[in-house]
Image (cartoon, helix red, strand yellow):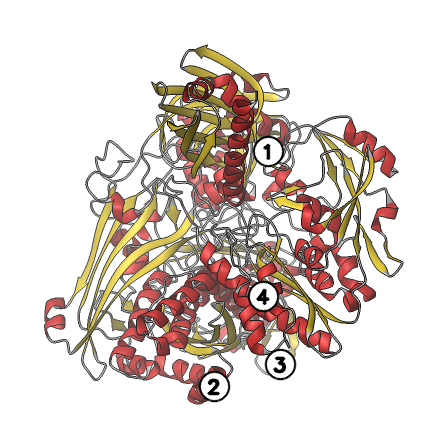
Amino acid sequence: MITQTFTIESPATIEEAITSLGRSPDAKVIAGGHSLIPLMKLGLSEPKQLVDLRRIRQLREIKNEDGAIVVGALATHRSIADHAAIRKTLTALAEAAGGVGDLQVRSRGTIGGSLAHADPAADEPAPALAFDATVRVIGPKGRRDIPAREFFKGPFETALASNEIVTDVRFAAPAGRVGSSYLKFAHPASGFAIVGVAAAIALKGDGTIERAAIGVTGAAASAFRSSASERALTGTGGDANAIAAAASKAADGISALSDLAASAEFRKHLVTVYARRAIELAIERARG
Amino acid sequence: MTATAPATYIGTRTPRKEDPKLIRGGGTFTDDVTLPAMVYVSLVRSPHAHARIRRIDAAAARKEPGVVTIVTGKDAEATGVLPVFITVPGLNGTKHMPLATDKARYAGDAIAAVVADTRHAAKRAAELVTVDYEPLPVIVDATKALETGAPILHEELGTNLAFTYPVKGGDIDKAFRDAEATVKLRIVNQRLIPNAMEPRAVVAKFEAGELTVWSSTQIPHFVQLILSLNLGLSQNKVRVIAPEVGGGFGSKLQVYAEELLVAHLAKTLGRPVKWTEDRREGYLATIHGRDLVEEVEVAAKRDGTLLGVRIRTVANMGAYLQAFAPGIPTILHAFIIPGAYRIPAFDCEVRGAYTNTTPVDAYRGAGRPEATFAIERAMDRLADEIRMDPAELRRKNFVPPDAFPFTTISGIMYDSGDYGPALDRALEMADYKAFEKRRVEAKARGRYRGIGLSSYVEICGLAPSKANSALGVGWGGYESARIRVHPTGAIQVFTGTSPHGQGHETSWAQIAADAIGVTPNDIEVRHGDTFESPGMGVGTFGSRSLAVGGIAVHNAAQKIREKVIQIGAHLLEASPDDVVVQGGKVFVKGVPEKAKAFGEISMAAYLASNLPEGMEPGLEATTYYDPPNFTFPFGTHIAEVEVDPETGSIEIIRYSACDDCGRQINPMIVEGQLHGGITQGIGQALYEAAVYDNNGQLVSGSMMEYHVPNAADVPAFALDHTVTLTKTNPLGVKGIGEAGTIASTPAMVNAVIDALSPLGITHIDMPLTAEKVWGAIRNAGEARR
Amino acid sequence: MHFEGVVEVAATRDRVWSFVSDPARVAACAADVEHLEVIDATHFRVTVRAGIGPIRTTFAIDAEFTELRAPEHAEVRATGRARGSAVEMSNVVDLADVGDGRTGLRWRAEVNVSGAIANIGSRFMQAAADKTTRDVFACLKERLEAP
């Protein structure tokens, strides 16, 4: 039960939304509500004003922009998981979106909400990082582009200012022989990622690995790119040994989360296991 | 007795009469009850696990718009004490008031009740109540609570020891002297949260001197009795209604603080009052289950013959005793530990300890899952120790079929049993013979496959009243049924049972239909309302409803049948011995075309002008049935699992069960009970644990942390049955509501341990989470280096 | 829950001491202060909003310096209330002169949370604890090292 009083506004345009948000430091954006409303019901979040973005229909669109796929901030996880072009060329994103919560949650929750809320255990930050996505935002001072790698600052903390709104997330078209995957070890109760790994692989003409990007979520204070694994994999033939060697580095240097669900040690171990499995699958898909 | 009707409906998969309404959302649950001028209660609960209550400041709360009144422990003493229905010898009982006055003894202990005209206002105001607490040292571990120097919860007792309960038989010292093989293991049977789908709720109204209470309860009659006694109301002026109740599993087998409080408030305010818990509150305020630590030792001969079992148990009672708590780890656990086996010597001692945690009481199986887990894990350890096949070890020690009725070494008498065929059938369904091949094949894929058995006997059909009295249970164990036939032939069965998902409206209709010679659709079964029920009902718990309540229905229906025969014979001018009752008619054997319809018989009973000499008018019967014994269903469950050593994940490959609950009234309902029961038992084995930190905080406080298993977590179960009737009751029925839960937990754990035994792993404590399994594998690998 | 941290500040020990023994200045660094009431030299009450990201609860805290050994050691005990929750904290601050006009500050805190936050917030608590520690030290350094 939400016992605190609050107002809710439903602006029709992005400009109106920015104005509403700017009226008070206690104003909070709500989209699908599946992160915010549970927090409000539990008394863990007490915004006095909610700015509901759902009337701004253009934020829902998923479109092609000069070969890049631009996913509107209000695109639901379900629409992303079902989108043919995303499934084909950004498979890891479709798989991450398709594994969020359950069908009811996926039909309401949005990618904008997931990235902006930055729950350390959320799924979509991992492929956002692996695909080097650009988070496009708008605020009273205008628009700006934030690379995914600079977006996630800490648990529930992003580079987004409190008076800014995510409008869309831009994924550059992966070129060449590419494949990606997202695999997670889910919390049996909540379904959140205890560990989730997105691997995006691009192969050269000779079959060696030109580009490897490994995005990891659930394991640390915020989602991260595993550069050590990426360096170890790039340039290799992508054989079992190379994959194993690269995956074994996937948790290097991280300060893993430890909670009721899993210890830091188990998380670090799972990162290496899921990195290996995600890389294997991504390479297999890249090889076609 | 005259000719018996062929049993047409007993034994059939009659579709449940309850379901069409429930599936369409048509049932009325307690929270659906809305009355004019109703007010709402929100409880202020202690965040501290152990603290003195210095001062309660409700000034700010009272100013909140909509607040009607705020009541603390001192104001609510008129509610009286919460009852405990079971006494064991030497019990150190506690005085448990609905609202704490001097101390909060667990996080969630209710301190004050805020009443307001909306649910929101009540909750908002409750948040404004300020309580000055003086935190005290906290104890959550039951074993440590019994050590000198532990913080004491109930100062007047001077100890946290609630009771010491021994059960012994034979010469245990000789057993261990003669032993050629012994095994020892320490078992943690972890605390669980019942998670009935419907949270608890209570509504009460007091009008013209009559109190009406709706409550999500398994025992409306006991609630009525206690409300009457505690609130000083004549029992005929107290009506308790259990409307649709969405699951209980023992968590609603209580008289709760909220029931007393809400009734008391309705009486003092003169307005209807409602309280509904939300899930998070329920995790703290509704009883928890299990929470035992057991040290088990088994002595045996090399050839597997059991010589003796010794077991020492510490049971966590939580902060207070709830209604049936003293009987769960004692009566329902200690006596049944010998299980399916002939054991010459037995030595069990159970100690109960108070700790700063939510009170613990009955949860599906209530003592028997703990007992079965202990003996079935021990049997597997023994099998491993003497290198004997676990199935053959069990078979060797089974109580043989010719030994029944069989008095166990613990002193209870099993009614009937034939354990071998159930084991055989389960082994067949599980394709046990070919398992080793499957283990090897899985290993080649880098996976560990295991198979695990559990052969159980459980004690249910609670209870013979004399046994209750001897065991310290403060009430009889009978059940009642009243059958009322209206002049036009409409039939109502009023049962003292109180179903909350078990399908009694269907099963009792089947039983009565067969006796009276009509169809189940001709019979309305009503339950849960003390106003219209027989004088007293006991309720639904402990897999008792069919073996006790169903027999009461049967016996009452036989009385109706007898009178129908007498009236019918009289109207047909025939001898009662020549008359048949069948298909809604009464006719002379061989002359079906000259029949009297059931409606003609019932009308004749009430017209009363043409009845047999000396016969009273009317067609109605009431029966109180007191079972001569408990009943003892049994069976074998077999689980097959595969472990991924990289992650510790467990996949359930196959699950087979052969159960024997005597005669099955409705096989579809039996299957449903097994589906749910097995799933709950798997939940304990793999997923569930109520976790407290050292500060007495329940850190697994919601369904985000606490995994209640769902359909996706379990495979399709292969179920079969044998039928070994019991002579204890005329229908030969036993009970099946809890058997699935009792059997499945040890079968699952045995399977996982079997999978990991090549690594030298012999035990992992439940729940078998991925991390625990992975950790055990990793440690085993290191140990072998 | 345990918070701990060490930070070196480019300021003399006396300056650092006068900061950490002043409730107003410490509270301003620790959280979103809604209200501060100084009862006496060692006793103060403060209402703060603490948390991480959108997860933010208001706490009414009652705090007392139980030990003040200028300029090296201070202990503060605090009890607080939030909606449906209670918090108990004991803080220990040790200051060491590390030369060059610099001070080493060591802070240890034990925090016990009871009630609603403990039931459902355990996932967030460690994250909040780590962030708070970082933020407090950064703020402290910034204010003490400011010209």
How far apart marks 4 and 2 lie (CA) works out to 29 Å
Which is more foreground, mark 4 or mark 2? Answer: 4
Which is more foreground, mark 1 or mark 2? Answer: 1
Asked where in the image residue B637 lies, by quadrant, the reply is bottom left
Which is more foreground, mark 4 or mark 1? Answer: 4
Query: Which residue is tagged 3?
Result: B591
Tell me the quarter of the image containing the N terminus of chain C: top left
On screen, residue B763 versus residue B165, left or right, reads right
From where the camera sits, is residue A241 visible? yes
How far apart marks 1 and 2 lie (CA) works out to 53 Å
Q: How many marks on residues? A: 4
Asked where in the image residue A37 lies, by quadrant, the reply is top right
Q: Which amino acid is tagged 1?
A: Arg
Above or below residue B525? Residue B135 is: above
* Residue at mark 3: chain: B
Mark 2 neighbour density, 10 Å: few (under 14) some (14–19) many (20 or more): some
